[in-house]
Image: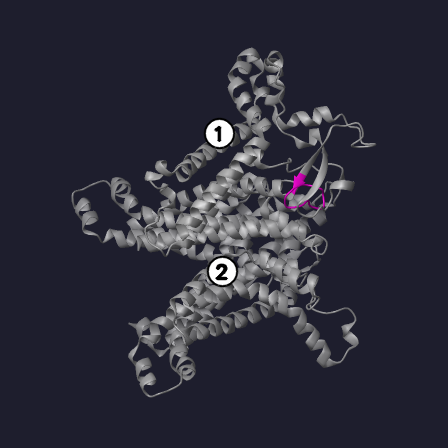
Amino acid sequence: MVTLVIRRIAVALVLVFGLATLVFFLSRLLPGDPALLFIAPSVPASVADRLRNDFGLSGSFTHQYISWIAGILHGQIGYSFSLHREVLGIIGNTLPYTLLLAGSAIALEFVLAIGVVYCLSLKNSPSRNRFFSVASISMYTIPSFWIAYLLLQTFTVSSHIFPSSHYHSVGIDTASWLSRNADFLLHLILPVCTLALPGAAGLSRFLKASVDQVAGMEYVLFARSQGQSTTRIFFRTILPNAIAPLLTLGGLELGTLLAGALITEQIFSLPGMGRLTIAALFARDYPLILGCTMTAGIAVIASNMLADILHATLDPRIRGVRRA
Amino acid sequence: MRKKFLNAALLLLTALMTVLSVLRWKILAAAIASLVSFPFACLEHYNGTASLMSINTADYWLAAIVWIGLWSVCLHSSYRLIIPHAARHPVRFTQTQNGTQTEYLIGLFLLAGAIAGAAVAPILAPVDPLTQGDLLSTRMKPPLSVLSLEENDLSCLTLSFSPGVMFESSSRYLLGRETKYISTGGSFSSPLEGKKVSEVLVLLGTDDYGRDVFSRLLYGARYSLDIGMCVLALSLVAGTLIGFSAGYFGGMVDSTLMRLCDLLLSIPPLFTTIALMSFLGSSIPVLILILGATGWMGVARIIRGEVLHLRTQEYIIASELLGVHPFRIMRDHLFPNALPILVTVAVLQLGNIVLAEASLSFLGLGIRPPTPSWGNMIGDSLHMIESGWWMGVFPGIALSALLISLHFLSDRNRWATS
């Protein structure tokens, strides 16, 4: 187990290092000197030099590369000139919002997928399965911004049930603790649904296949012959065995969710990485864009690593297989 | 049951196409006349050929040819349905072997519909997708309302049918849609007074700039599919080359390429696209390049897996023992055997690309307005969501239908090949 954890962490570190190298080459090999865009002829030479220094554009190519890697190790990705702050500080402020959004979306995905597959397992009819197959493929393929549009149209424009944007209502700061949190949850529902619905459809397809496979095992037959109820068999016997492989998928899902957050946060005007990235793109704020890209990559690598480790912890069989 | 349904659909389609052909005979006739007279016009103005031909004109030619082709196929098939003794041979595409593939049929029809709709857009579209008309009367009209537009705004190939002027005016109407800007004459005071006005039924309403949603939908399909096909070609070629060399040569080549793949896949693709866009700008060719550069990894992985599997087959080992050149083995043995899976991947990949383009356009980064694209139509309609549902709902339905049909097709392919 310890070796597995150490190996996973080592692989993740190598990937992060590769990512940093890739981002460096991306920013240096592409045409144009980013600093030139911001240095007007009237700018004093000292300011221009400072700008170049901030970009890490002074010195030789090797020197630039080493200082870029050293900067990352010291937690200095760059200085955002549209927000006039350290990139790491900005990302540190916005990342929690996106992680909250993505985390609740993943949780909702698993709940929805398990619920749907449980309902399907109650009665195994071909017409139901076929309906599930078509519906889940359709749900999985529909673009998330279209889902957001429909949700907004139904729940905000037509029926005023959920608010359309931001995490807080205006003037809620003075209200009681309880109503503040209720307000926050109410604001969270539509964005989380937008993110989670396609993912839940994809996840439920995999879970269905996995459950079908496990349901044919002899221990399930044994449990059934003991006279246990279908519900008990599903949640106590089938699900723990069927869900372990899906955890790896949950790790991969984070990448999709981060990309989805790019769109969802834009639609619902939420603070977070996605909106930050797009704002940085429109402001041509290169250090911030590179920082956001790096963060997204690191988040995906880290979540894959965690999913692998979690998978091995929950399913002792994996450890033996990996070691062999 | 299904056969009856399909036959009814076919008859309906034929009737619709016939009615539309009659309604739009002017455009059809003008397109064909300009196609026929183009060589003569070229001969006449042989030193000014470049100005005779514009992309728009070629659009009309293509549309007219596709339209007439589709129409004749429909007429031919329904003729056999209507006339009893001609129906000895049932129509071919309503024949299906097994009863479980309704999704496949739906997918096929939707995809064919999208491609055909994009191809015949100039004929099918009642108005030019950029025409705004008089904003006071054309803005935000709900579906099925009637607009009054200047004759010039209808922007079709205009054609005078008196035989004498035909050759003289050929060079003018060959220029296609641009003629309308010349003849409008720039009188903005009372837009429709004293002008020849015609009424247009807007099927799906108009947007907040007074442009017809249906026409924009048709022209938007062109951009989505054009970009999709170009990017697909790029990413398939790159992915296949990389996948083949990784799978065939193995060793260092394989591990280097696959680690690169892992690395690129670790960044969510939308982020890579945005980062690249910030350096390279966002014109359509750049968009195609960037989407191609970020789309080959999935293809390469699947192809590599397939090649690794094929390499263990006896016939490959035999040809290696015979000393056949690796390139020839790839061309003659590996490629044909990997083709079915390549097709499945391609269909799925096309869906991903269309979705990526739509997402970027939705965010305002891909295709910029006023050029229509399904993504930017939904994006633009978002701030008008309270006043006009039709501006976002119809492009959304079209986009979702296209994506779902591509998934159905690739799903069926996967079953067929496995």
Magenta segment boundaries in residue numbering: B201-212
x and y percentages locating residue B335 in the rendered image: 30, 44
Q: Amino acid at mark 2?
A: Tyr
Mark 2 falls on what kind of element?
helix
Which residue extends farthest right? B189
x and y percentages locating residue B83 in the rendered image: 40, 36
x and y percentages locating residue A195 in the rendered image: 57, 64
Other-residue count near label 1 (Cα within 10 Å), few / some / many at <14 / 14–19 / ≥20: some
Q: Amino acid at mark 1?
A: Ile
Q: Main secondary structure of the magenta part?
A: loop
Find out whether residue B232 is within the magenta segment: no
Q: Report the residue at 68% width, 73% height from top.
A: A184
Can residue B108 be seen in this snapshot?
no
| Front one among B86 and B345 | B86
Q: Which mark is residue A179?
A: none
In the picture, residue A279 is in which quadrant?
bottom right
Q: How is the image coloured?
A: one colour
State which chain disc 2 sits on: A
Residue linked to disc 2: A140
Mark 1 falls on what kind of element?
helix
In the picture, residue B322 is in which quadrant?
top left
The vertical placement of A17 against B130, above or below, is below
x and y percentages locating residue B136 in the rendered image: 78, 41
Q: Report the residue at 36% width, 39% height from top.
A: B87
Find out whether residue B206 is within the magenta segment: yes
Residue linked to disc 1: B65
The vertical placement of A118 against B295, above or below, is below
State which chain disc 1 sits on: B
